[in-house]
Amino acid sequence: MSTPTLSVTNLRTHFFTKEGVAKAVDGVDFDVAPGEILGLVGESGSGKTVTGFSILGLIDPPGRIVEGSSIRLNGEELTKAKPDRLRAIRGAEIAMIFQDPMMTLNPVLRVDTQMIETVQAHLKVSRAEALARSRAALVQVGIASPDERLRAYPHQFSGGMRQRVAIAIALLHKPKLIVADEPTTALDVTIQGQILFEAQRLCRDSGTSMIWVTHDLAVVAGLADRIAVMYAGRIVEIGRTADVIERPMHPYTKGLIGSVPSQNTRGHKLAQIPGMTPSLLKLPAGCSFKSRCPIAVEQCNTMPELVEHRPGHWARCWRAIAA
Amino acid sequence: MLVYIIRRLMQAALVMVVMSALVFAGIFMIGDPVAMMISPDASDIERDAVRASLGLDKPLWLQYLAFVNAAVHGDFGKSFLAGQPAMQLIFERMPATLELVFFSTVIALALGLPMGVYAGLRPKSVGAKTIMTGSILGFSLPNFWVGLMLIMVFAVLLPDLIPGFPRLPASGRGATVNVLGVRLSLFTADGLLHLLLPALTLALYKGALIVRLARATAREVLPMDYVKFARAKGLSENRIVGVHVLKNIMIPIATVNGLEFGQSVAFAVITETVFAWPGMGKLLLDSILLLDRPVVVAYLMIIVVFFVVLNLLVDLLYSVLDPRVRLESRAT
Amino acid sequence: AAQELKIGIKTEPSALDPQFHTLNPNIQVGAYFFDALIAQDAELKTQPALALSWKAVDDTTWEFKLRPNVKFHDGSDFTAEDVVFTYERIPKVPNSPGPYTIYTRSMKSFEIVDPLTLRIHTNGPAPLLPLDVAALPILSKKAMAGPAPEGKTTAELNSGNGLVGTGPFKFVEWQRGSKIVGERNDAYWGPKPYWKTVILRPLSNNTTRVAALLSGDVDMIEDPPTTDLAKLKNDPKITLAKAISNRVIYIALDQHGEPPIGIPDTNGKNPLMDKRVREALSIAIDRKGIDDKIMEGIAVPAGDLLPYPMGGTRKDTPVDPYDPAKAKKLLEEAGYPKGFSITLGAPNGRYINDLKLAQAVASMWTRIGVKTDVDANAPPVFFKNRDSFKYGAYLAGWGASTGELGNALKSLAATPDRVKGMGTTNSGRHSNKEMDAKLEEALVTIDDAKREALLADASKILMAEHGLIAIHFEVSVWALRKGLTYPGRADQSTFAVDVKPAK
Amino acid sequence: MSETSLVAPKPQTPFQRVVSDFCEDKLAVFGLVLVALALFVAIFAPWISPQNPFDIGSLDLLDAKAPPGSVSGDGKLTYWLGTDGQARDMMSAIFYGMRTSLFVGFVSVVAALGIGVVVGLVAAYAGGRTDALLMRIVDIMLSFPAILVALILLSVLGKGIDKVLIALILVQWAYFARAARSAALVERNKEYVEAAACLALPPSRIVFRHMLPNCLPSLIVIATITLARAIALEATLSFLGVGVPVTEPSLGMLISNGFEFLMSGSYWISFFPGIALAIAIVGINLAGDHLRDVLNPRNLR
Amino acid sequence: MTAGGAPILSLRGITKRFTQKVDLAGKIANSLGAKVRETVVQAVSDVDLDIEEGEVVGLVGESGCGKSTLGRIVAGIQPQSAGTMRWRDKDVGAMNGGERKAWQLAVQMIFQDPFASLNPRLRVSEIVGEAPRVHGLIERGVQAKYVAQMLDQVGLDGSYSTRYPHQFSGGQRQRVGIARALAVKPSFIVCDEAVAALDVSIQAQVLNLFMELRQRFGLTYLFISHNLAVVEHLSDRVAIMYLGRLVEIARAEELFARPNHPYTQALLAEVPTLDAARRVYKPIAGELPSPLDPPSGCAFHPRCPHAFARCKIERPALKEVAPGHLGACHLNDG
Ligand SMILES: Nc1ncnc2c1ncn2[C@@H]1O[C@H](COP(=O)(O)OP(=O)(O)OP(=O)(O)O)[C@@H](O)[C@H]1O
Ligand SMILES: Nc1ncnc2c1ncn2[C@@H]1O[C@H](COP(=O)(O)OP(=O)(O)OP(=O)(O)O)[C@@H](O)[C@H]1O
Ligand SMILES: [Mg+2]
Ligand SMILES: [Mg+2]
């Protein structure tokens, strides 16, 4: 593998709230290679979004990236970067796409304003040139009559179009990495298809790396090169898509796969993971999944490490192979 | 748009009819205008004559019908007290009130908006808490008290105590210039000086309101996804606060301020009384106390129209500020 | 600027047409621009003005000799024509809320003997005609010419059109609510005013008015509030001018009969019908204390309806002494040893300290056992209540513009009679036939001395009966910046002509 | 299926949560203390006042305008805060004034809130013509000057605190009606309202049992602000001579009456009531402000 | 599913228009030369659908195509503008008071948003127990017991009844919503995107619950969703909706195996599956047109790869293409 675009090691992002310390992300490691799409999967509250925001340095108080974490973009350490440098990186080298397309664009500013300001935030170019770039970006994501669309306000767009505008904004500076946080969850299947199509084409054509966050394994199954499964602030399994889907090693991953309804499940009970995600405020010692795990053993009271059980296929489970 | 205006005007007409009927009944219930105005030396016969000449001898509903009939033809009656068309009296006074309210709005915005946004950005800071506590005083101190205090302090005490402290005029309107046939004092130094204290009195309340509103909306807008997205785009903090946040804050501020503008115009009564400001609020107050019904009715008519126009402007402004709003759909 | 006088007045006139509204501020400002045939001096005694002399030719005819060589502001001559025009215009003024016909009601016809001699024929004996005439400023017939029946209309006069008189000042402008500006009439027939320009600014709020004076916005104000007098007195930059006024503050007691109004605990008996009770209520009032504590020394305890030496007053009028012990005894004699309850009506903001006065009186009455509840209201409400007899007792004021007792007695104390115009403001409905007779005789007696004697008798009867309780005469106060003097006037008017720099 | 492994959140009622959240802000607690103080004084005025300022028989004009700390003419009483122009002990007057002001403020705001909420909710739920009609009435009320309303009432019904109360209610309910309507319009489109409709619950129940509790928090915050406004408005009416009866002065009236004494040096007649008013209002709003944050539905999640 | 017999619910020509009328002001404006027209959103057009007792019918379509509106009409929350709805062979429009209430309670709805659909200020005991009590199904005294029983049915502990909605997770909230519906003993449940807001793992729990309840109480479902996988998992029959109209109805296996309408085909192509093979997405072109101004003819023609001239002019009718399989496409004629 060539040098990764992004390399995250031991990322720990904690929220210091009045109820206690919420360890939203607690020791996450992964790399993203150039042009690679990494699917980050996990149930609600498992820390996917926080991981994304951590990479962009957008954690608001009371949250903080804890000492000892490391996020490297092409070798540059971001956790130690100055605010100005971070600002320069955001939007230019790392871009982000948010979940809800209805909320990510400022409703009172025209689309051109929101695009031009992004161009000008990182490049000293004239308005006209910024506009030309913006137009080009809209064309790239397949928006028809871009000139007209530029002069419109977000509310005049459908959800799918808005999400495409958001992607266009992310593309303006040809970033090395795009963090897409559930960008299709709020959209229809047909529109989701369009967005997935754009994303795929993009990475293929421009070599941009992407982290695609979702809670729906099915979405990333056909898209991602590799999949990372998160649970309670940690990555519990990571590997090539085919490996993870077809030969999952962590019981949680298995549970997830089993709970996806499909043709084959018709008339049957879906497999379901019992119980709920434990509160991040008081995680039990050891494996945080043990209370819901069908195959938990005594050993699970100590935290397992993320171990490469097969080539390129890592899992954080004592019984990974046994399962 | 046209429909919208027409709908508004129809509602205004309705409100006017009800309002004038209420005023007729109300003044009738308060007392006898003639008893207020005529010389106490006058005999009953002379009083009856005056009543007849002012049309007050007829049954109330006849008086009202006569009024409506005349009003439809554009005649809103003559002031009992001044003998002049009530509308004319009010229009004479209107510029003074408008410029007072306008100036105070400017002051309130200039002071209130930055303070409110600051308090919204740093809600836990000492500065924010001071601002918020101060703003409570701003809208809870009675207007007349603030006005009189300002007069005492800036027109009397400070200049007396500190030699060389500029003495602000305590009352009345300063030199005026004629702008398109309207007398305005906004454009002369003397005029502005006279405006200062009364405008400040009015601005205190408004400013307090703006501070609170700005803070509240800032707190609502800041956690929005689009603010975070703006950060993710790498925009500078200045642009985020100054454009993305501020433009969203301006929507409620503009709406509320527009409506408050109307309220202030309508009820600048107290400030005008305290500062002997020759505006229409003072006219209204005097007219109410002297039961000068035509003026009160005409005044309220004007205010209704004024509110309608203002609402319209506010809605227009609203649709300019907030592109999501289409006027037709907000027709209430 | 030099020779500019700015006066903070309490109330703005409603019109500049001197025949539109019989309102004190109108009358006051009228005197800046116009003269009447007769003027009233500071004590309200008649003085020659545009008329040099006048006399009653017979019971129903008065003859006036007019002052020669008087010019209107527009340079035209003043003649009897102008006077007749003026008087004849009065009934034609439309929509007047306070018509001047109350001053012309006795006038039957006018006779111009020669340009400077005028005779007025009256409906009956009109002893007070000179006083009526004094209330009627003379307009210029020429300047007043216009298409309306009344010549120039009120609206035109308000804008200055036709506002041409013979008075000490010429009209410059009126910005409603803001200021009235006059300029010295250099051709004035009388003593010329010192001031080149005079500006009247309406400042109705007491505190604002004082602040305006203190801050130098104005040179002089009317009626500083009593609470500020002490401070103003000690202020080295301010002088005060005072004059006892023609306004009496009194309490009227309901005497229409039974059941009483607002007295719930006497089993339907009206204690106020009893002279002893009325006396008790009067002597329960500590007029001196009120004068000191509430009026800050600007009131004179009253035992009559006008201060001496105005027409019909007696030099030795006694003021009811403060004697709560005796008051209690009188109540006991009258059969109210435990007193009773009563509501005292009062206006709020019509007379100097009216509300505080009512409260003080209530407190004093309560101390002798008459539990008093003050019902103070905004003036329109007060007047309505008073005129519809809602009060068992009410506090009010009366300023006899004529400066003689006939006016006050007729309005406040005579038995109400709609046709004769008697007792128009007698809402306590006190009635005393003996007094009525004296008064009615006085009202048709031309001879001044005889008339005044009759009035004195009438008022003596009234006061002995305690038909009304007179409390005090207001003392009018003006505050001026140091270096100005003002002699003060009994009618509470502020005339810029009389304001002069101190020598 | 098992739900037992779930970490059960403490069964804390919203009320308990509000209380515990509220107590976190020192300033708000301080505000609450001020309010408690004001309420104490107001409620117990007749028992803790040195003098009954309503009993005009006990006033001796000779003691008028005594500075703070003077002793009364009969030596029985010390006027800690001085006396006013009527020889009323300022401290007693303030206690009673607080009573009147808070009474007028609270009652008028609560009543106005009640009327406004009903009108606003009904307008929002019914929509159409009912809505238009109710809102026009609100418009009329909003443009009707308070002083005119007060004057009409005083002249028709006579003098009294209750009349001032009615005037204040008449003037203020329209604000609440507007606010309640816009809050209800938001609530009306929420799915829980549809759910209630689907359960065939009667409309009155949907409006008052379901929508109302969700509209109230924002209205209560408006109410704390309006309370301050109401007290100020009452003071202004007193200033214009159409306020509470002189014999039952409110703080606003004490301030406005005392104001004329300010220039002559008898500062205490206006100053102390002013301080008292400020304490009450600042207290109410400090507490109210924080209450707003605590009641914010977003914190309910 | 019972063969034969009257369907439990039968819709004929159900249409829903949202109209903004031209009022007096508009008329005046028109007389002044403005062109104010009535705006009509035809959210549901001419829907015919029979649902048998015990059946699960899936309703699928893009956002804004009128699924929720149809669901609300069925649940009696909104009246239709035209068409008739028969409940157990009785015209709903002609029902008397008692029948009406029985129908209203018999048809219940479960909503998409587990946060907005529960009143945040009511305790669970009230949320679930209020309606049965108000409607006299239970006595006040037994409410607590009844609520506990309902909660138990949806797999929640009875002790939760004193809690407020915010103290639950999304899946639990959805269960409370289901308990609320079950509490009035319905026989028909409209699920409007009832699992769309839930995580996959929770979704599975809720879907299982639906299946279980169906078996236990013989419930009939109208299951609205845009998630084809979920619909496929659950439904006996599936109806596809496009811009207010039903374009295809068939038994689930049939539909997924042999989609007739081009829109259905496109939809199926989009469904993400747990298929680790890297897929090449090829989306349907274009966006959903505005219901304010629907295309002429077949509403799908602007996006349809097979569209020809006739599609622009004539609207295809819903015709049987195979036994029990209805489709609305001109291709079926050729
Ligand atoms: N500002 C904050 N303060 C306290 N805790 C927070 C904050 N933001 C996030 N968290 C906590 O961090 C955890 C991870 O949140 P995150 O948003 O990353 O989850 P997610 O995996 O993106 O879930 P979802 O699928 O619902 O978006 C959650 O338990 C959340 O409660
Ligand atoms: N009350 C209403 N007034 C006007 N138009 C409405 C109203 N309710 C729904 N509509 C319109 O009817 C159409 C269908 O709406 P509906 O909510 O039924 O769609 P849906 O298929 O449920 O969409 P989604 O998947 O987004 O929930 C939409 O265009 C919508 O804008
Ligand atoms: Mg997330
Ligand atoms: Mg829907």
Image (spheres, coloured by chain):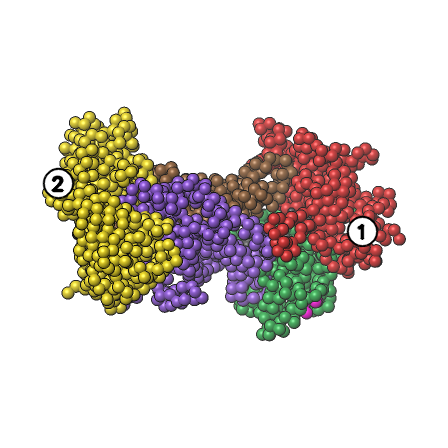
Chain colours: A green, B purple, C yellow, D brown, E red
Looking at the image, residue C274 lies above or below residue A218: above
**Mark 1: which amino acid?**
Arg
Q: What residue is pinned by disc 2?
A: C318
Q: Is mark 2 on a helix, strand or loop?
A: loop
Q: Position of residue E298 (x, y in %)?
A: 79, 53
* Residue C277 in magenta stretch: no
Instruction: Single out the residue that lies furthest toward the front.
Output: C113
Tell whether E43 sits left or right of B166.
right
Residue for point 68% across, 56% down: A184
Q: What residue is pinned by disc 1?
A: E315
Residues tagged by mark 1 and mark 2 found on one chain of the structure: no
Q: Chief secondary structure of the magenta span?
A: helix
Cα gap from disc 1 to disc 2, whole angstroms: 110 Å
Residue B63 seen anywhere in this rendered image of the structure: yes
Q: Is mark 1 on a helix, strand or loop?
A: loop
Q: Which of C195 and E95 is in front in this view?
A: C195
Instruction: Single out the residue that lies furthest toward the right.
Output: E334
Residue for point 55% across, 62% down: B244
Q: Residues within 10 Å of mark 1 (few under 14, many from 20)?
A: some
Looking at the image, residue B241 lies above or below residue D206: below
Tell whether A92 sits left or right of E229.
left
Instruction: Single out the residue that lies furthest toward the top.
Output: C267
Q: Nearer the viewer, residue C268 or D185?
A: C268
**Where, by quadrant of the figure, is residue C360 drawn?**
top left
**Highlighted magenta segment, given as a residue range:** A136-141
Q: What chain is tagged by disc 1?
A: E
**Mark 2: which amino acid?**
Pro
Q: What chain is tagged by disc 2?
A: C
Q: Position of residue A75 (x, y in %)?
A: 62, 69
Label number found at residue B102: none
